[in-house]
Image: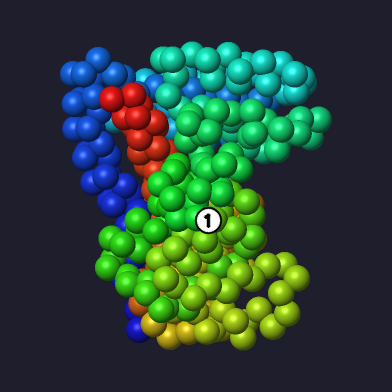
Amino acid sequence: MSAKLINGLEIAKKRREEMKQKVSELKKEGITPHLTVILVGDDPASKSYVSGKEKAAKEIGISSEVIHMVADATEAELLAKISELNHDADVHGILVQLPLPSHIDENKVIEAIDPNKDVDGFHPINVGKMILNQDTFLPCTPHGIIKLLEAIDCDLEGKHAVVVGRSNIVGKPMGQLLLNRNATVTYCHSRTKNLKDLTKMADVLIVAVGKAHFIDASYVKEGAVVIDVGVNRLEDGSLTGDVHFDSVKEKASFITPVPKGVGPMTITMLMENTIKAAMRLR
Ligand code: GUN
C-alpha cells in the first residue's frame, strides 16, 4: 500500500478562510480578537514558532503582539506582566511560549494566566475541563490532529489509537481527546517495554517523541493512519519528523508529512482559540 498524504497545509488554509469571515463579523460588532504572546529569551526555535503565529494572525485579521522579555527576566517580572494582561480587557488570548528558562517555574506561570484567556489550553482548570469532556480551550497540537483525522473521515469510534510520547503539550492531551471520541487509547513512552508490539496494534498511530526517524515501517501495521508530530532538524539543515516517512508511507493508509502536516494545524487551532476567547464577549 502507498499511503495518501494528509495535507495539513491545505486543510489549515481552508479553516483559515472560514476564520477570516468570522473575524470580519466580530469586527463589525466592534470586537477585534487580540492575542498577546510572551517570549522569554532568544531560543531560535521558539522565535521561529512565534513569528509563525504572528504571520497567521495577520493573515486572518487577528490583532497580535509579541512581548519579548530578556532571557534573565525574573519569574516575578513575568508574573507581573501576565497579571497586567489578565486585567487588560482588550487582550483576549495570552500565550507564554515554552520552554521557559530554567530559573522560571513553568507551572506557576501557566497557573497565573486567566483560564478564560488561556488559548494554549494548558491551565489546570482547562485541562480538567478537557478530561471531563466539557467545552473549553483545547491544546492546539492535539486538537489540530483531531481536525486532520476528521478531514480524512477517520472514524475513531472503537479504534485502537496508540500515542507515543507523554508530554503535557502533546502526548497526554492527545490520548484524552482520542478517548473523548471513543477510541481505545494506549500511551507509550521512553520506559515502555516491547514498544513495537504495541505500535503494531495501532489503527491510528501518533508519534510525538522528538527523535528523527524513531518509527520505521517495522513499527507500523498495514493500513494504519500515521500522524507525525516531530519536527527535527538534520545536520544539513532540513526538517524531518519522528517517523521514517519513506518506509512508513508504503505501509500506512494515510500519513502526515513533515513539514506541512501537523504544524500548520497547530497554529490554526491557536487562532481558533483566540477567536473563541473574543466571542465570549458577545
Ligand atoms: N512550545 C512548543 N509548543 C508550544 C505550544 O503549543 N504552546 C506554547 N505556549 N509553547 C510551546
Snapshot quadrant of residue 149:
bottom left
> Is 177 left, or right, of 207 in this rendering?
left
How busy is the neighbourhood of tag 1: few (under 14 within 10 Å), some, or many (20 plus)? some
Residue at x 76% of width, y 30% of height: 104
Q: Find residue 123 and report its horizontal and vertical position in percent.
A: 58, 39
Residue at image coords 58%, 14%:
84
Q: Which residue is mark 1?
A: 131
Residue at 53%, 72% in the rendered image: 185
Q: Is residue 268 above or below residue 86?
A: below
In the visual, does 217 lie left or right of 268? right
Q: How is the image coloured?
A: rainbow
**Is residue 278 shown above or below 268?**
above
Q: Is residue 65 above or below residue 20?
A: above
Question: Which residue does the image show at 20% across and 25% down from the upper left?
Answer: 24
Say which of 163 and 128 sits in front.
Answer: 128
Residue 273 percent location from the top left of the image: 40, 37
Instruction: Assign the C terminus to one quadrant of the image.
Output: top left
Place of residue 36 in the rendered image (x, y in percent of width and height, measured from the top left):
49, 23
Q: Is residue 183 visible?
A: yes
Pick out the residue farthest to the right.
Answer: 103
Where is residue 153? Give x, y as percent. 27, 68
